[in-house]
Amino acid sequence: MPSFARAFVSVAFFLQQFVTKPIGEFLSGSFVGVIEESVKSLFREAFQAGSRSCNAVLSLILSGVPRESKTEATQRKKAWKSWHSSSFSSFNFLYGSDDDDGRAPRSLSSRFQSNHGYMMFGKRGAQSLTEGQSSRGLLEDLRFTLEVFVSRVFGGVRRFIRWIFRLEEEHRLHSVSLAKRRLRKWERLYTFTASDAILKAGYPLEECYVTTEDGYVLQMHRIPRKNSRKVVFFQHGVLDTSLGWVSLGTGGSVAFAAYDDGFDVWLGNTRANPPQRNALKKKSEYWRWSANELALFDLKAQFEYIKRAKENEEISSYSLQAVGHSLGAACLLMYAVHQKSIGKDHGLDRLVVLSPAGFHPRIPFLMRSFKYLMPFATYILNRVSSTRGIGLRLPSWPLRWVTFKLMADVNRSPVFFDLFSLAFRWIFGGDSSDWTKAMSLPHYNAQAMPAVSLHLANHFAQWAKRHDFSFYDYGSPQKNMDVYGQPVPPSVAGQYALLADLPIDIAGGTSDGLIPPENAACHEYYLRQAQVPVTMNLFEYGHLEFIFGVGNEIVTYIMKCLNTNTT
């Protein structure tokens, strides 16, 4: 090789090693990296500034609207102060200082209702069901997605620079990998049920599957105390599951309190809940049912299962009591009346009904249109098909995913929480329950959720229009004759005399906008007229607070009622 060629190679090697390579490494490393992180920080700060500006404007609008008590206002003021002093760059990462009791810090939304919030939202003294679980909101996912996009763009720029300067591809973990892993850290892909809550709280569990006479598969949860002769059955209300009875954990769930007091505890579900399977009907026919089927098929099948289970455990003599909330309470009354009307024993020794449905002379103003809309929709469906039903729920998993993600964002932002809470209070007649938080329960997710059938909604409309607690009206005298043997559906309240041997305890909520105390008092009136042993007590609760905001007062009341028959 000529000397000039060797000199050229040497100079080129020198330039490559000591000029080109360092420049390329600097540009593809520190320089591009700083710009990349700056852009990401810009997005983060834009999210923060946008959320704060939006919250400020909405807070100004809502400032003149009376919506909470003085105590709640003080708690809200503290929450706002903590939120504004947060050092995090996104309002989806809101954690305040440690609580006075020395526990780990909780999210801001979990501190809003420290007195009335349920275990899902950090109720004091309760083990949090959602501890350690991912609950990102839609905005947080959007921010992660933008970070991944930015990382990919700058990753391409980095690779281009290294190609221009003839550098080897670096083998190190870029920020895009971390962002992608955070984005792909998906929430649980199964429905968080009462089983998870019971096991997490350290209680024994049995999962039972029951098939009704008309083929619906129901899941029951049992906290077994097999040698106990004290048995209690809990039935949830509309758009709820058995999870509600254990959502307060060890700090206040009435189901756990009953087990600790020596009861064999059974948590019921209905066909409205997962697994939502039917062995006999087509998928299009699944949702054709009313409260009749929930009472006469679902409850009957579950009570018969309990009876067989106790007999198999050689407990032939036991006391079965039932606690129901809202629609669950109404269905328990319907079941007991129907069993007696056909000459059979209902097998119950006591009923405790919390804010019972059935009588609805007073309903929220914004919901009154449903009294006429539901019958019309049901009439149209019946004209189209005599077997088809419709489930009233978010119809697709993408829509459910987006909705429940947004609700997670709402629960993390003080003003949006206020806005949605105020909207729900308007819709539900001033009800004080935390509806926004109720929609964040784990059984509302992309894979599945509780639902309501169109015919059940029509049954509610019939109760509201006629001011009578009756069985379902099938729409014509002939159809009613085929089912009941009479042209009009029989009145449940009109047959309360059949329950003369069944003590019934009623609890109503003075802050309940869906079923106000005067509605619940209708049950008491007809029961007293029928000489049924009945008591009624009022609590300063909203509709959902009987389940999700349960305090010592209502737990003590329920346990006192249940122990009346066992002492």
Image (cartoon, helix red, strand yellow):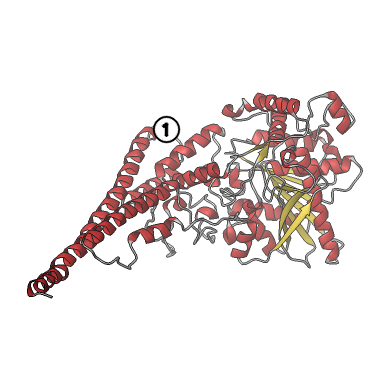
- Can you give x and y, in whole percent of width and height, for residue 521 in the image? 70, 36
Would residue 315 be visible to someone looking at this image? no
Residue neighbourhood size for the residue with mark 1, other residues' Cα within 10 Å, grouped as few (<14), some (14–19), many (≥20)? few
Depth order, front residue of 379/554: 379
- Say which amino acid is labelled 1: Val
**Left or right, residue 15 beside residue 500:** left
Residue 379 position by quadrant: top right
Identify the secondary structure beneath mark 1.
loop
Residue 537 position by quadrant: top right
Residue 361 position by quadrant: top right
Depth order, front residue of 27/302: 27
Report the residue marked by disc 1: 65
Depth order, front residue of 134/529: 134
- Can you give x and y, in whole percent of width and height, for residue 357 in the image? 69, 38
Residue at figure coordinates x 58%, y 59% from the top left:
249
Image quarter in which the N terminus is found: bottom left
- Can you give x and y, in whole percent of width and height, for residue 141 in the image? 42, 50
